[in-house]
């Protein structure tokens, strides 16, 4: 159990995937990089802001590599470790790969945290990796002003089955694997207003491995896949649009929302990251004029260990959705479709809007 006198979230200025640098600023940073060595074996690099790098070893094997780490999103050390590790492994699953091993990335303010607390964080990460069937084979640690934990993860996949964010086709159906709202719940926790049921709701989603991604790789009708994390649903869907040179249409009434997050969002709870996200990509999104501010905030809400976002052929949509449900992703839902046109997202109201009715 956590020491009630120690609040991990009070030791950092941000938490979870809400720590990510704003997408517009990140784009400027990467634009200044010199041209990199062109390696013909590098199947997926940084060109389309995909989830992981993919390097072909031979005709039947490719290595998938990614790293993800952040500051505490919760106060319970073990839970922080579990969430951070689950989130890092998601990048591997988002390509369709099977994780092989992980290395821990650890930065801790050792003058502020008892050793036992740090050990609990590491134990939580190890538990998540054990659930994924892999070991944490090593890592690196430094003494930092704020707590940081995450993984560098390695996976393996058949090169012909790699799922990218760049392969979506017009009329592909969009399916989201988890409900939205983790960022809202994390903000409420930091403010001291999140109740126990709300915390349990957040923890259940944030520690659910996206392991179904490995099985989704076997479905040829899935043309693109990514996971929804710090840039929110709109941000990561826009990455699919840009990479695939297509537009997308969201049906707002179909979006799965965490009940506690919706209630808090209606009360005005929000994250700073949602505002930064909207400022970065708002001009590329067309939303209904009647959409309320809290509704837009949920669309931009930074998801920590969020769900997989799949673009698949209409004929495969029922099969994909059934697989999600059979594997325990109860909130998985069809949320829209890809369309021909410029790279943008158009959100439309169908049966009801996010406020109900």
Image (spheres, grey):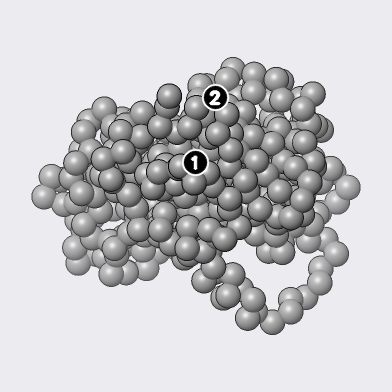
Q: Secondary structure at mark 1?
A: loop
Q: Residue furthest front?
A: 289
> How far from the left and from the top, in percent, is residue 308?
59, 38
- Circle 2/circle 1 CB separation < 8 Å: no
Quadrant hosting residue 336: top right
Q: Is residue 93 left or right of residue 343?
A: left
Quadrant hosting residue 43: bottom right
Specify the label residue 306 is tagged with.
1
Above or below 103: residue 280: below
In the rendered image, is residue 148 in sight? yes
Is label 2 or label 1 in front?
A: 2
* Crowd class of label 1 (few under 14; some 14 to 19; many from 20; radius 10 Å): many
Q: Residue furthest right?
A: 59
Quadrant hosting residue 349: top right
Which residue is rendered at x = 18% and y = 45% of the image? Answer: 192
* Crowd class of label 2 (few under 14; some 14 to 19; many from 20; radius 10 Å): few
Give the labeled residue for mark 2.
351
Q: Nearer the viewer, residue 26 or 259?
A: 259
> How far from the left and from the top, in percent, is residue 159?
81, 46
Considering the image in quadrants, where does the C terminus appear?
Answer: top left
Which residue is rendered at x = 22% and y = 30% of the image? Answer: 196
In the rendered image, is residue 154 in sight? no
């Amino acid at each position: 159990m956590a020491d009630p006198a120690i609040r991990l979230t009070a030791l950092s200025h941000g938490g979870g995937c809400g720590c990510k640098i704003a997408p517009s600023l990140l784009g400027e940073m990467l634009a200044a990089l010199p041209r990199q060595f062109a390696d013909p074996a590098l199947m997926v690099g940084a060109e389309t802001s995909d989830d992981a790098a993919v390097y072909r070893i031979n005709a039947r094997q490719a290595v998938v590599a990614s790293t993800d780490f952040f500051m505490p999103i919760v106060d319970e050390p073990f839970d922080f470790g579990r969430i951070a590790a689950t989130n890092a492994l998601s990048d591997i699953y988002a390509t369709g790969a099977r994780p092989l091993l992980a290395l821990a990335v650890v930065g801790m303010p050792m003058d502020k945290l008892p050793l036992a607390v740090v050990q609990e964080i590491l134990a939580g990460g190890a538990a998540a990796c054990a659930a994924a069937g892999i070991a944490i084979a090593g890592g690196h640690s430094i003494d930092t002003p704020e707590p940081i934990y995450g993984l560098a993860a390695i996976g393996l996949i058949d090169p012909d089955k790699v799922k990218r964010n760049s392969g979506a086709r017009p009329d592909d159906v969009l399916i989201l694997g988890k409900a939205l709202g983790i960022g809202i719940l994390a903000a409420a926790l930091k403010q001291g207003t999140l109740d126990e049921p709300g915390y349990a709701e957040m923890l259940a989603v944030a520690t659910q491995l996206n392991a179904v991604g490995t099985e989704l790789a076997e479905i040829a009708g899935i043309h693109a896949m990514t996971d929804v994390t710090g840039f929110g649903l709109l941000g990561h869907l826009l990455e699919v649009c840009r990479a695939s040179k297509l537009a997308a249409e969201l049906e707002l009434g179909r979006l799965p929302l965490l009940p506690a997050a919706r209630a808090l969002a209606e009360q005005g709870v929000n994250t700073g990251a949602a505002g930064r996200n909207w400022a970065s990509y708002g001009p590329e999104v067309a939303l209904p004029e009647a959409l309320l501010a809290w509704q837009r905030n949920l669309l931009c809400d930074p998801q920590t260990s969020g769900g997989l976002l799949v673009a698949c052929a209409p004929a495969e949509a029922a099969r994909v959705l059934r697989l999600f449900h059979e594997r325990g992703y109860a909130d998985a839902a069809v949320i829209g479709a890809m369309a021909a046109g410029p790279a943008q997202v158009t959100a439309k109201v169908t049966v009801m809007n996010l406020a109900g009715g």
